[in-house]
Amino acid sequence: MRNSKHASLLELTIGQKIMSIILHLVMLMMVLYCIVPLVWLVMSTTKTNEGLYSSPGLWFADDNVFLQNIVNTFSFQNGIYGRWLWNTLMYAVVAGLGSTLFATFAGYAIATMDFIGRKWLLATTLAFMSIPSSVITVPLYLLYSQIGLVGTPLAVIIPQLSNAFGLYLMIIYAQTSIPIPLIEAARLDGANSWTIFWRIAFPLLSPGFVTVLLFSLVGVWNNYFLPLIMLSDTKDYPLTVGLNVWLKMTSDSAQLSVPNNLILTGSFIAVIPLIIAFVFLQKFWQSGLSAGSVKM
Protein backbone atom coordinates (compact mmCIF):
# COMPACT_ATOMS: atom_id res chain seq x y z
CA MET A 1 0.00 0.00 0.00
CA ARG A 2 2.77 2.38 0.96
CA ASN A 3 4.77 1.40 -2.12
CA SER A 4 1.84 2.20 -4.40
CA LYS A 5 1.35 5.61 -2.76
CA HIS A 6 5.06 6.32 -3.02
CA ALA A 7 5.05 5.32 -6.68
CA SER A 8 2.07 7.57 -7.43
CA LEU A 9 3.73 10.51 -5.67
CA LEU A 10 6.93 9.87 -7.61
CA GLU A 11 5.01 9.79 -10.89
CA LEU A 12 3.24 13.01 -9.92
CA THR A 13 6.55 14.68 -9.12
CA ILE A 14 8.07 13.56 -12.42
CA GLY A 15 4.98 14.77 -14.27
CA GLN A 16 5.19 18.15 -12.58
CA LYS A 17 8.87 18.47 -13.50
CA ILE A 18 8.16 17.60 -17.13
CA MET A 19 5.31 20.12 -17.25
CA SER A 20 7.54 22.75 -15.62
CA ILE A 21 10.25 22.17 -18.23
CA ILE A 22 7.72 22.42 -21.06
CA LEU A 23 6.26 25.65 -19.68
CA HIS A 24 9.71 27.17 -19.22
CA LEU A 25 10.64 26.26 -22.80
CA VAL A 26 7.44 27.82 -24.12
CA MET A 27 8.09 30.96 -22.08
CA LEU A 28 11.69 31.10 -23.34
CA MET A 29 10.47 30.84 -26.94
CA MET A 30 8.00 33.68 -26.36
CA VAL A 31 10.72 35.86 -24.81
CA LEU A 32 13.05 35.18 -27.75
CA TYR A 33 10.21 35.90 -30.17
CA CYS A 34 9.81 39.35 -28.60
CA ILE A 35 13.46 40.16 -27.85
CA VAL A 36 15.27 39.01 -31.00
CA PRO A 37 13.54 41.49 -33.39
CA LEU A 38 14.22 44.33 -30.94
CA VAL A 39 17.90 43.34 -30.64
CA TRP A 40 18.16 43.18 -34.43
CA LEU A 41 16.57 46.63 -34.68
CA VAL A 42 19.00 48.11 -32.15
CA MET A 43 21.98 46.57 -33.93
CA SER A 44 20.73 47.83 -37.30
CA THR A 45 20.68 51.43 -36.08
CA THR A 46 24.46 51.29 -35.59
CA LYS A 47 25.22 50.32 -39.19
CA THR A 48 25.56 52.02 -42.52
CA ASN A 49 23.25 51.03 -45.35
CA GLU A 50 25.97 48.76 -46.74
CA GLY A 51 26.75 47.39 -43.28
CA LEU A 52 23.22 46.01 -42.99
CA TYR A 53 24.10 43.37 -45.57
CA SER A 54 27.80 42.83 -44.86
CA SER A 55 27.71 42.29 -41.07
CA PRO A 56 25.93 39.81 -38.75
CA GLY A 57 22.33 40.80 -38.12
CA LEU A 58 22.49 40.38 -34.35
CA TRP A 59 25.85 42.08 -33.81
CA PHE A 60 27.49 45.45 -34.29
CA ALA A 61 29.25 46.42 -37.49
CA ASP A 62 32.91 47.41 -37.52
CA ASP A 63 32.02 51.09 -37.89
CA ASN A 64 29.40 52.30 -35.39
CA VAL A 65 27.41 55.14 -36.96
CA PHE A 66 24.51 55.27 -34.50
CA LEU A 67 24.69 59.01 -33.81
CA GLN A 68 25.16 59.77 -37.49
CA ASN A 69 22.09 57.70 -38.34
CA ILE A 70 20.07 59.68 -35.78
CA VAL A 71 21.20 62.97 -37.31
CA ASN A 72 20.56 61.77 -40.86
CA THR A 73 17.10 60.49 -39.96
CA PHE A 74 16.00 63.83 -38.52
CA SER A 75 17.57 65.83 -41.36
CA PHE A 76 16.37 63.69 -44.29
CA GLN A 77 13.76 65.39 -46.52
CA ASN A 78 14.08 68.71 -44.68
CA GLY A 79 13.44 67.13 -41.29
CA ILE A 80 10.08 65.55 -42.10
CA TYR A 81 10.73 62.75 -39.58
CA GLY A 82 10.69 65.22 -36.68
CA ARG A 83 7.31 66.48 -37.87
CA TRP A 84 5.98 62.91 -38.01
CA LEU A 85 7.26 62.26 -34.51
CA TRP A 86 5.60 65.40 -33.20
CA ASN A 87 2.32 64.49 -34.93
CA THR A 88 2.39 61.02 -33.38
CA LEU A 89 3.05 62.42 -29.91
CA MET A 90 0.22 64.90 -30.31
CA TYR A 91 -2.25 62.28 -31.58
CA ALA A 92 -1.29 59.84 -28.83
CA VAL A 93 -1.48 62.35 -25.97
CA VAL A 94 -4.70 64.06 -27.04
CA ALA A 95 -6.60 61.00 -28.24
CA GLY A 96 -5.12 58.57 -25.71
CA LEU A 97 -5.63 60.79 -22.67
CA GLY A 98 -9.02 61.98 -23.90
CA SER A 99 -10.37 58.48 -24.52
CA THR A 100 -9.09 57.34 -21.12
CA LEU A 101 -10.81 60.22 -19.33
CA PHE A 102 -14.08 59.57 -21.16
CA ALA A 103 -13.84 55.85 -20.39
CA THR A 104 -13.16 56.60 -16.72
CA PHE A 105 -16.09 59.02 -16.38
CA ALA A 106 -18.51 56.72 -18.19
CA GLY A 107 -17.25 53.56 -16.50
CA TYR A 108 -17.61 55.11 -13.06
CA ALA A 109 -21.14 56.30 -13.83
CA ILE A 110 -22.32 52.97 -15.24
CA ALA A 111 -20.75 51.00 -12.38
CA THR A 112 -21.92 53.11 -9.44
CA MET A 113 -25.08 54.94 -10.52
CA ASP A 114 -28.54 53.54 -11.14
CA PHE A 115 -30.28 55.18 -14.09
CA ILE A 116 -32.56 54.27 -16.98
CA GLY A 117 -30.72 52.54 -19.82
CA ARG A 118 -27.76 51.45 -17.69
CA LYS A 119 -27.93 47.80 -18.77
CA TRP A 120 -28.51 48.84 -22.36
CA LEU A 121 -25.34 50.95 -22.33
CA LEU A 122 -23.34 48.03 -20.96
CA ALA A 123 -24.71 45.70 -23.65
CA THR A 124 -23.95 48.29 -26.33
CA THR A 125 -20.38 48.58 -25.07
CA LEU A 126 -19.92 44.82 -25.34
CA ALA A 127 -21.38 44.87 -28.85
CA PHE A 128 -19.04 47.64 -30.04
CA MET A 129 -16.05 45.69 -28.72
CA SER A 130 -16.75 42.98 -31.30
CA ILE A 131 -16.67 45.40 -34.26
CA PRO A 132 -13.23 45.78 -35.90
CA SER A 133 -12.14 49.39 -36.23
CA SER A 134 -11.35 48.87 -39.92
CA VAL A 135 -15.05 48.18 -40.60
CA ILE A 136 -16.15 51.68 -39.55
CA THR A 137 -13.18 53.58 -41.00
CA VAL A 138 -14.72 54.02 -44.46
CA PRO A 139 -18.11 55.17 -43.08
CA LEU A 140 -16.23 57.61 -40.86
CA TYR A 141 -14.37 58.90 -43.90
CA LEU A 142 -17.64 59.52 -45.76
CA LEU A 143 -19.13 61.26 -42.71
CA TYR A 144 -16.10 63.45 -42.07
CA SER A 145 -15.79 64.35 -45.74
CA GLN A 146 -19.30 65.82 -45.61
CA ILE A 147 -18.46 68.04 -42.64
CA GLY A 148 -15.04 69.04 -43.94
CA LEU A 149 -12.79 67.27 -41.44
CA VAL A 150 -11.00 64.93 -43.85
CA GLY A 151 -7.39 65.99 -44.24
CA THR A 152 -7.19 67.54 -40.77
CA PRO A 153 -5.74 66.13 -37.53
CA LEU A 154 -9.24 66.16 -36.01
CA ALA A 155 -10.22 63.35 -38.38
CA VAL A 156 -7.61 61.18 -36.65
CA ILE A 157 -8.20 62.36 -33.08
CA ILE A 158 -12.01 62.39 -32.78
CA PRO A 159 -12.69 58.74 -33.77
CA GLN A 160 -10.12 57.53 -31.25
CA LEU A 161 -11.70 59.40 -28.35
CA SER A 162 -14.22 56.56 -28.03
CA ASN A 163 -12.72 53.35 -26.71
CA ALA A 164 -15.23 50.55 -26.09
CA PHE A 165 -12.59 48.21 -24.71
CA GLY A 166 -11.28 50.85 -22.31
CA LEU A 167 -14.83 51.66 -21.21
CA TYR A 168 -15.53 48.01 -20.49
CA LEU A 169 -12.32 47.70 -18.46
CA MET A 170 -13.21 50.76 -16.38
CA ILE A 171 -16.73 49.46 -15.75
CA ILE A 172 -15.40 46.14 -14.46
CA TYR A 173 -12.65 47.81 -12.43
CA ALA A 174 -15.04 50.35 -10.88
CA GLN A 175 -17.47 47.60 -9.92
CA THR A 176 -14.75 45.70 -8.06
CA SER A 177 -12.74 48.56 -6.53
CA ILE A 178 -15.28 51.18 -5.41
CA PRO A 179 -17.48 50.27 -2.42
CA ILE A 180 -20.94 51.79 -2.85
CA PRO A 181 -21.35 52.39 0.94
CA LEU A 182 -18.29 54.64 0.79
CA ILE A 183 -19.93 56.81 -1.87
CA GLU A 184 -23.22 56.91 0.04
CA ALA A 185 -21.39 57.95 3.20
CA ALA A 186 -19.68 60.77 1.30
CA ARG A 187 -23.05 61.98 0.01
CA LEU A 188 -24.44 61.97 3.55
CA ASP A 189 -21.49 64.13 4.58
CA GLY A 190 -22.50 66.69 1.95
CA ALA A 191 -19.99 65.93 -0.82
CA ASN A 192 -21.20 66.55 -4.36
CA SER A 193 -20.70 64.13 -7.26
CA TRP A 194 -17.65 65.98 -8.60
CA THR A 195 -15.91 65.90 -5.20
CA ILE A 196 -16.77 62.24 -4.68
CA PHE A 197 -15.30 61.31 -8.03
CA TRP A 198 -11.99 63.17 -7.72
CA ARG A 199 -11.39 62.79 -3.96
CA ILE A 200 -12.67 59.25 -3.39
CA ALA A 201 -13.31 57.32 -6.60
CA PHE A 202 -10.41 58.41 -8.78
CA PRO A 203 -7.63 57.34 -6.36
CA LEU A 204 -9.25 53.91 -6.26
CA LEU A 205 -9.57 53.88 -10.06
CA SER A 206 -6.01 55.06 -10.75
CA PRO A 207 -4.55 51.57 -11.50
CA GLY A 208 -7.37 50.95 -13.97
CA PHE A 209 -6.92 54.46 -15.37
CA VAL A 210 -3.22 53.84 -16.01
CA THR A 211 -3.98 50.45 -17.59
CA VAL A 212 -6.51 51.94 -20.01
CA LEU A 213 -4.17 54.88 -20.69
CA LEU A 214 -1.36 52.52 -21.69
CA PHE A 215 -3.65 50.55 -23.98
CA SER A 216 -4.95 53.78 -25.51
CA LEU A 217 -1.50 55.27 -26.03
CA VAL A 218 -0.23 52.12 -27.72
CA GLY A 219 -3.37 51.85 -29.85
CA VAL A 220 -3.17 55.44 -31.09
CA TRP A 221 0.61 55.30 -31.51
CA ASN A 222 0.44 52.17 -33.67
CA ASN A 223 -2.68 53.14 -35.62
CA TYR A 224 -2.00 52.98 -39.33
CA PHE A 225 -5.21 52.53 -41.30
CA LEU A 226 -7.18 55.48 -39.89
CA PRO A 227 -4.56 58.20 -40.57
CA LEU A 228 -3.79 56.60 -43.93
CA ILE A 229 -7.42 57.07 -44.97
CA MET A 230 -8.06 60.44 -43.34
CA LEU A 231 -4.86 62.37 -44.07
CA SER A 232 -3.54 63.54 -47.42
CA ASP A 233 -0.76 65.97 -46.50
CA THR A 234 2.51 64.23 -45.63
CA LYS A 235 3.19 66.90 -43.00
CA ASP A 236 0.22 65.60 -40.98
CA TYR A 237 1.26 61.94 -41.11
CA PRO A 238 2.12 59.99 -37.96
CA LEU A 239 5.20 57.77 -37.85
CA THR A 240 3.35 54.63 -38.92
CA VAL A 241 2.24 56.15 -42.21
CA GLY A 242 5.37 58.22 -42.74
CA LEU A 243 7.79 55.32 -42.32
CA ASN A 244 5.69 53.26 -44.70
CA VAL A 245 5.98 56.07 -47.25
CA TRP A 246 9.76 55.91 -46.90
CA LEU A 247 9.67 52.14 -47.28
CA LYS A 248 7.63 52.40 -50.48
CA MET A 249 10.03 55.00 -51.85
CA THR A 250 12.82 52.46 -51.37
CA SER A 251 10.97 49.44 -52.77
CA ASP A 252 9.50 51.28 -55.76
CA SER A 253 12.91 52.56 -56.88
CA ALA A 254 11.70 56.13 -56.79
CA GLN A 255 13.88 59.09 -57.70
CA LEU A 256 14.43 59.89 -54.02
CA SER A 257 15.42 56.58 -52.47
CA VAL A 258 15.50 56.28 -48.69
CA PRO A 259 18.41 54.29 -47.20
CA ASN A 260 17.21 51.28 -45.24
CA ASN A 261 19.34 52.19 -42.23
CA LEU A 262 17.42 55.45 -41.88
CA ILE A 263 14.09 53.60 -41.96
CA LEU A 264 15.32 51.21 -39.27
CA THR A 265 16.68 54.08 -37.18
CA GLY A 266 13.34 55.83 -37.48
CA SER A 267 11.57 52.65 -36.37
CA PHE A 268 13.88 52.39 -33.36
CA ILE A 269 13.19 55.99 -32.33
CA ALA A 270 9.46 55.32 -32.67
CA VAL A 271 9.67 52.54 -30.07
CA ILE A 272 11.46 54.62 -27.41
CA PRO A 273 8.50 56.83 -26.30
CA LEU A 274 6.33 53.76 -25.67
CA ILE A 275 9.04 52.19 -23.51
CA ILE A 276 9.40 55.45 -21.57
CA ALA A 277 5.63 55.61 -21.08
CA PHE A 278 5.51 52.07 -19.69
CA VAL A 279 8.42 52.70 -17.30
CA PHE A 280 7.09 56.08 -16.16
CA LEU A 281 3.45 55.03 -15.68
CA GLN A 282 4.39 51.84 -13.87
CA LYS A 283 5.20 53.88 -10.74
CA PHE A 284 1.74 55.45 -10.75
CA TRP A 285 0.28 52.00 -11.33
CA GLN A 286 1.93 50.63 -8.19
CA SER A 287 1.19 53.72 -6.08
CA GLY A 288 -2.44 53.60 -7.17
CA LEU A 289 -2.73 50.01 -6.10
CA SER A 290 -1.29 50.87 -2.68
CA ALA A 291 -3.59 53.86 -2.26
CA GLY A 292 -6.59 51.81 -3.28
CA SER A 293 -5.80 49.06 -0.80
CA VAL A 294 -5.48 51.58 2.05
CA LYS A 295 -8.71 53.37 1.20
CA MET A 296 -10.60 50.12 0.80
Image (tube, grey):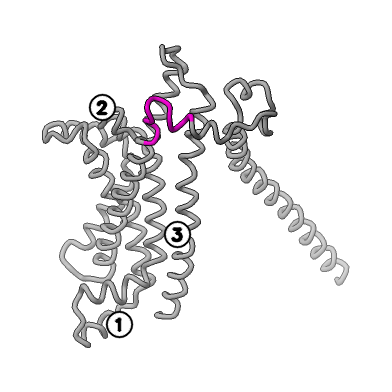
Looking at the figure, which quarter contains the N terminus? bottom right
The mark that comes first in sequence, 2 or 1, is 1
Rate crowding at label 1 as few (under 14), some (14 to 19) or many (20 or more) other CA atoms within 10 Å: few
Q: CA distance from mark 2 to mark 1?
A: 53 Å
Q: Which residue is mark 1?
A: 181
User: How far from the left and from the top, in percent, is residue 234?
Assistant: 30, 28
* Magenta stretch prevailing secondary structure: helix
Q: Which residues are magenta?
A: 72-82
- Relative to 192, say whether 235 is above or below: above
* Amino acid residing under circle 3: Leu
Q: Quadrant of the C terminus?
A: bottom left
Mark 3 residue crowding within 10 angstroms, few (<14) / some (14–19) / many (20+): some
| Residue of label 3 | 281
Label 1 secondary element: helix
Residue 15 part of the magenta segment = no
Q: Position of residue 170 (x, y in %)?
A: 34, 61
Q: Dots 3 and 2: beta carbons under 8 Å? A: no
N-term mark: 3 or 1: 1
Q: Secondary structure at mark 3?
A: helix
Label 2, on which residue? 232
Mark whose residue sits in front, 2 or 1: 2
Amino acid type, label 2: Ser
Residue 269 lies, in percent from the top left, at 48, 39
